[in-house]
Image (cartoon, grey):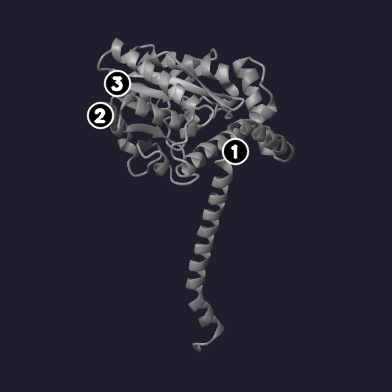
């Protein structure tokens, strides 16, 4: 084939074109993230809920999947919880509101690392007081702080980061199944948090050991104890039988299996968000070695769902806690 044939010319151009395409794709992504950072870091927090509601109305008009999800959550309210639904628009807006809050927190800290969130700091203060009381009542008992899945995972993590400061800890471990680096480097925004990733393919079997080490080293670790079985369908979780809303249910057994032998105390809490303000409810501590600990956690999961259903990040699956794949 002649060296100046069209095929030879194209083959020589192929690699430079691929490099150029990758460079352009990366540049466009950086530009989009930069523009999003400029906008989202300056959005007033009070505007997030109205924006989410408007987006939900538009989604209800054009997105059949969104309408089905809202109907599913409304059915859960009526059929399982036996309470009136908060309204389909509010239920549909929850996911959008979560994303907006996540971005406002992440990009706000990216623009100004020392940006203060007094509401979240106040909740961290309540948790620090509760941990202090646990340590007075049961000296030497490690504490597993358990944020339930409400409002925003970024907000939960920011509460934990401030709790770390209030407890005087250099670092704190958090077990999380959240996708990483959605809006940029999470590690740069929360450098003092050791994220123990649930879906880590390289060290999944060592996750329990990592949690135990972190608990022994710092005396406090963070585990989301209300995670429903369906979220780990790729890696079926070990569950324990309980009753939720008067029916048989299954919840994650890992926190009891790890915390019970160590004499750990579980301290759950959940967030709420209304009119641009964060609130929080700190629930009663539970000794994980107690025989009734799983049912008490189940009752707290039920209490949180009754009090703050529309802000739940895990509802929207027909089974929720009613079914678990065999491990």
Which comes sooner in the sequence, label 1 or label 3?
A: 1
Mark 3: secondary structure:
loop
Q: Marks 2 and 3, Cα distance to the nearest angstrom? A: 10 Å
Is residue 32 left or right of 232 when viewed as pictured?
A: right
* Mark 1 residue crowding within 10 angstroms, few (<14) / some (14–19) / many (20+): some
Residue 222 location in percent, x, y?
A: 38, 28
Towards the viewer: 216 or 273: 273
Which comes sooner in the sequence, label 1 or label 2?
A: 1
Q: Quadrant of residue 136?
A: top left
In the image, residue 233 above or below residue 265: below
Residue at image position (30%, 10%) is 137
Is disc 2 in contact with disc 3, using a CB cutoff of under 8 Å?
no
Q: Disc 3 marks which residue? A: 142
Is residue 102 left or right of 65 when viewed as pictured?
A: left
Which comes sooner in the sequence, label 2 or label 3?
A: 3
Residue 290 location in percent, x, y?
A: 34, 12
Is disc 1 in contact with disc 3, using a CB cutoff of under 8 Å?
no
Residue at image position (65%, 18%) is 78
Q: Quadrant of residue 210?
A: top left
Residue at image position (55%, 57%) is 28
Q: Nearer the viewer, mark 1 or mark 3?
A: 1
Q: Marks 1 and 2, Cα distance to the nearest angstrom? A: 39 Å
Q: Marks 1 and 3, Cα distance to the nearest angstrom? A: 39 Å
Q: Residue furthest right?
A: 61
Q: Quadrant of residue 269?
A: top left
Q: Which numbered disc covers residue 43?
A: 1
Q: Which numbered disc covers residue 217?
A: 2
Q: Quadrant of the C terminus?
A: top left
Q: Nearer the viewer, mark 1 or mark 2?
A: 1
Q: Which numbered disc covers residue 158?
A: none
- Residue 322 visible to an observer of this rendering: no
């Amino acid at each position: 084939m002649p060296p100046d044939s069209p095929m030879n010319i194209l083959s020589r151009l192929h690699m430079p074109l691929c490099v150029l395409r990758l460079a352009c794709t990366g540049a466009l992504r950086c530009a989009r993230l930069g523009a999003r950072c400029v906008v989202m870091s300056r959005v007033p927090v009070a505007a997030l809920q109205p924006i989410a509601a408007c987006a939900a109305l538009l989604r209800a008009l054009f997105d059949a999947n969104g309408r089905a999800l809202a109907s599913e959550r409304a059915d859960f309210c009526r059929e399982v919880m036996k309470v009136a639904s908060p309204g389909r628009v509010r239920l549909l807006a929850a996911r959008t509101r979560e994303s907006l809050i996540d971005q406002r927190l992440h990009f706000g800290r990216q623009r100004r690392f020392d940006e203060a969130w007094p509401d979240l700091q106040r909740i961290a203060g309540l948790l620090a007081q509760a941990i202090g009381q646990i340590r007075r009542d049961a000296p030497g008992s490690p504490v597993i702080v358990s944020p339930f899945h409400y409002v925003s995972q970024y907000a939960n993590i920011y509460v934990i980061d401030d709790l770390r400061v209030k407890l005087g800890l250099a670092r704190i471990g958090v077990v999380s199944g959240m996708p990483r680096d959605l809006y940029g480097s999470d590690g740069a925004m929360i450098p003092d948090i050791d994220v123990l990733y649930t879906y880590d393919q390289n060290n999944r079997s060592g996750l329990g050991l990592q949690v135990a080490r972190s608990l022994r080293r710092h005396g406090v670790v963070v585990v989301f104890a209300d995670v429903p079985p369906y979220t780990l369908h790729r890696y079926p979780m070990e569950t324990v039988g309980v009753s939720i809303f008067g029916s048989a249910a299954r919840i994650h057994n890992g926190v009891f299996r790890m915390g019970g032998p160590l004499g750990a105390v579980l301290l759950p809490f959940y967030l709420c968000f209304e009119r641009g303000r964060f609130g929080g409810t700190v629930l009663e501590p539970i000794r994980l070695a107690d025989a009734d600990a799983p049912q008490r956690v189940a009752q707290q999961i039920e209490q949180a769902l009754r009090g703050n259903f529309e802000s739940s990040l895990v509802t929207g699956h027909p089974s929720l806690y009613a079914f678990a794949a065999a491990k």
